[in-house]
Amino acid sequence: MSRAEHPDRGLARDLIVPEGANLGVQLASAGTRASAFILDAAIMAATMFVVALVLVFGLIYYGMAGAEPIAIAGMLFFFLLRNSYFILFEAGRRAATPGKRIVGIRVVSRDGTGLSIDQVIARNLMREIEVFLPLTLLVVDASTDAIDALTTILALLWALLFTFFPLFNRDRMRIGDLLAGTWVVHAPRRQLLADLGMDAAAPAASGFRFSDSQLDAYGIAELHRLEAVLRGDNEEACWIVARTIATKIGWAEDIADARPFLNAYYNGLRAHLERELLFGVRRADKYS
Amino acid sequence: MTASSRQSLSSFRAEREGDWLAFEALLDRVEKRSPKALTDEELLDLPILYRSTLSSLSVARATSLDASLVAYLEALALRGYLYVYGVRESLGKRIGRFFLVDWPAAVRNLWRETLINLALLAIGAIAGYRLVAAEPSWFNAIIPAELAAGRGPEASAAALRAVIYGDGGNNFLSGFATLLFTHNAQVSLLAFALGFAFCVPTVLLVLMNGCLLGAMLQVYVAKGLGVGMGGWLAIHGTTELFAIVLAGAAGMRIGTAVAFPGDRDRLTAAARAGRTAATAMVGVVIMLLAAGLLEGFGRQLIQLDAARYAIGGAMLALWLLYFYLIRLSSDVARRAS
């Protein structure tokens, strides 16, 4: 499961969609969110730079006659960029800003219903105090006297409380997420991989035969770990796992090559556990 | 037994695999291009393939121990969910609903906070007025020098007159209007967002705004220019001050929802308040656009006091009618049913 790949189980959440299924999402960590934001901020800054450049060239070309339309275009563009970049992208077809898409995260409604534009607006208007307020305080000239400087520093600390709000709650919600009822979750793209259990022949055919007690040694957690090792290409890891399994189940014969043995054991164990599953027994790991 | 159960699992995958891959390919396409590029058949297939993926996920979770298969289906189902339940309404329809239903409804919903903020603005104005009336040096304490721009208790009546009836040189008017709009809108968005800190900064900002207003008004009234100043303010002020009051009300709504969630849990209360307040704030930005135009053009081009009062009064009447008196929404609902 996706949860097995993300070691942080504290961020796994249920997301019940209107069809009644639980999609079992993984919340994006504060670090992932921050990197997505930095990417978006860089895109915004680059856009701003290019547009400013174009406007300056326009001013040089048209002279003072073009000053007013150019100033208006500039002011409106920066206002729109600052206030609608996130809203337009998140309400658009891809439901994510470019930065979010690059790191593979998306915004979803906490209650599992569809995301509405009101929510997108609410969560992004709050960036005003999370991002722009601390930024404004940073550029404010605090050098006039000691009291002003102190006030600015205290105000900045206060404003940073809003910025670092996601670190103070379990769900990693920004203030905007809190007020919009949204979560930011991992939405990775995955390839459909071949089924390890089906391409190899049954365990008996490959020359290995395991008894029921040997197959009872492990549970589902170990099976998934074994699957990860088999899908990887680390031969050394294969050997270590093969030896561990051989010791645990008391495998007397020599193992000439780790992979065929592991493949056979994976097949046997999976068939065994899936059969138990059909009878309603879910053996979580080797301890249960 | 073992062999036959493996058999059914492998046939489950063999049977459904085609649907999953088709769904994935379809999602790839719709995310890149407009849904209009799809054929009718593909549009109809989309929700069917989505539900079939959800059902496959449930089957796989219950019967298969192939972790990569379950992870693939989880990721695919989430992608499908995000597309099928994304923000789908067409822009034109959405804008129509905003003006006909959502905006007035959000403002009506905030009536209690609106009254409180109106009172705060009035208290601030009265305080500013009385302070400057009692001791003119308060003026400099209340209004920063760069904002006062020479207007103050010491300024001559002629200089004060020039400000309210000057045409600002009559150039750069649209630039001035744009500057006013972007600046005021940004400040009101900030004032709204600050409401999250349990309303305190929002309340202070509204009080402060009232104070500025009162102090400025007193200076003009003291010089016998009260009527002219009133007109100078009224032409855009009815819209702008109303917008400020609404921004304060929206900020107060989110602050109180977080501090006092009432019967609901804090998260639900915050989410509900956030949606109403966000809708109202989009409206505030539109009102400030109107105010910027009135201030930038109207005030400079119209010099007659009576005309300024008439426009200001008409704007106020328009907003009040639109928000509170005419229920466009119920009309629409009745016509639709």
Image (spheres, coloured by chain):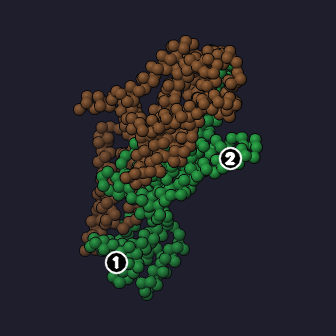
The picture quadrant where one finds residue B67 is bottom left
Q: Residue at x 27, y 65 (%)?
A: B8
Of all residues, the one furthest to the top in this rendering is B304
Q: Amino acid at mark 2?
A: Thr
Does residue B226 sit above or below A269 in this rendering?
Answer: above
**The C terminus of chain B sits in image quarter:** top left
Instruction: Report the side of B311 relative to B213 (left or right).
Output: left
Q: Quadrant of the N terminus of chain B?
A: bottom left
Left or right: A202, with B152 as reference point: left
Residue B133, disc: none
Which of the labelled discs sits on residue A151, or is there none? 2
Note the chain letter of the green one.
A
Q: Which chain is depicted brown? A: B
Residue matched to label 1: A204
Name the residue furthest front.
Answer: B134
SS under mark 2: helix
Is the C-beta separation of discs 1 and 2 under 8 Å? Answer: no
Residue type, numbered disc 1: Ala
- Answer yes or no: is residue A149 visible: yes
Q: Nearer the viewer, mark 1 or mark 2?
A: 2
Residue toward you, A207 or A135 = A135
Q: Please indicate, yes or no, whether residue A202 appears anywhere in the rendered image.
A: no
Q: Which type of secondary structure does the marked residue at label 1 adopt? A: loop
Q: Nearer the viewer, residue A13 or B116?
A: B116
